[in-house]
Image: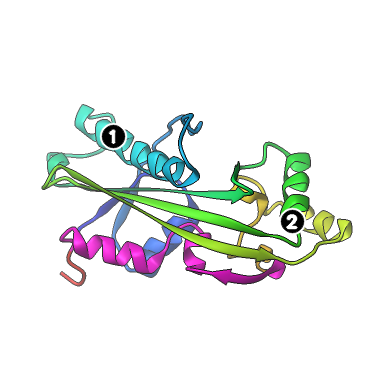
Amino acid sequence: MESIILASASPRRQDFFRLLGLPFTCIPAEIDETPLPGLTPRQVAEDLARRKTQAVVEKLEKGGAPCGDVVMRQWVFGADTIVVLDGELIGKPADRNAAENMLKRLAGRRHEVITAMALYNGRRGSMDCRSVSCEVAFAPLSDAEIAWYLDTGEWEGVAGSYRLQGLGACFITSINGSPSAVAGLSLHDFYVMLKDNGYRFGA
């Protein structure tokens, strides 16, 4: 199968690529992830996914990353996952206090998780962007439970301050949508996206 460049250093997305048996190389996009004003949450996620993918495409075109002589045949994939509560974006916590406040806000409530995916097809010179929305229900949490979770450090570097694929799953009572999307990549939608764009599995 053809190799795909993953515009991310996310260990979670790398795990999903390995699960699918996809050969890949990581080239982090290193963009400013500040949301552009005036966009809906879904538009924010899709814009960030596109910008991540485009940033890596431009790196390849400029020779700023290892690309050999096959730049124009490359597949480049970027994604972004955001958490939304009451219409407000809940980003990555800056520190433990921010993570504590986020978890207190999420506890006992439902929130939305949006994962956007952008795929660049070098042969066609085209960009395909799609997004998936899920509803996640959190159990009520005591201060002691939140402190216990914060002590694990699992909240660091993740939107909403919890990881579904880790101990954060202890707090989730239900998910309406794709669990893998909440963890960072909707496997079904990603698989369909690749096929729709001509990627050949098993070839």
Specify the quadrant that holds the N terminus: bottom left
Q: Which residue is mark 2?
A: 152
Tally the numbered discs. 2
Q: Is residue 129 visible?
A: yes
- Residue 156 image offset from top left, x and y in percent: 65, 46
Part of the protein shown in magenta? 170-199
User: Which image quarter: residue 200?
Assistant: bottom left
- Residue 136 image offset from top left, x and y in percent: 60, 63
Foreground pick, 109 / 191: 109
On screen, residue 100 versus residue 23, left or right, reads: right
Residue under the point 49% across and 68% down: 177
Mark closest to the chain's N terminus, 1 or 2: 1
- Describe the element under mark 2 as helix, strand or loop: helix
User: Which image quarter: residue 196?
Assistant: bottom left
- What is the crowding at mark 2: few (fewer than 14 residues within 10 Å), some, or many (at least 20)? few
Q: Is residue 39 above or below residue 160?
A: above
- The numbered dot on residue 65 is 1
> Is residue 185 covered in magenta?
yes
Residue under the point 48% across and 57% down: 184
User: Which image quarter: residue 109?
Assistant: bottom right
> Is residue 146 covered in magenta?
no
- Residue 104 image offset from top left, x and y in percent: 78, 52
Disc 1 residue type? Ala
On screen, residue 154 versus residue 124, left or right, reads: right
Residue under the point 27% across and 61% down: 193
- What is the crowding at mark 1: few (fewer than 14 residues within 10 Å), some, or many (at least 20)? few
Q: Is residue 68 above or below residue 152?
A: above
Give the foreground label among 1 and 2: 2
Disc 2 residue type? Thr
- Describe the element under mark 1 as helix, strand or loop: loop
How has the structure been colored for display? rainbow
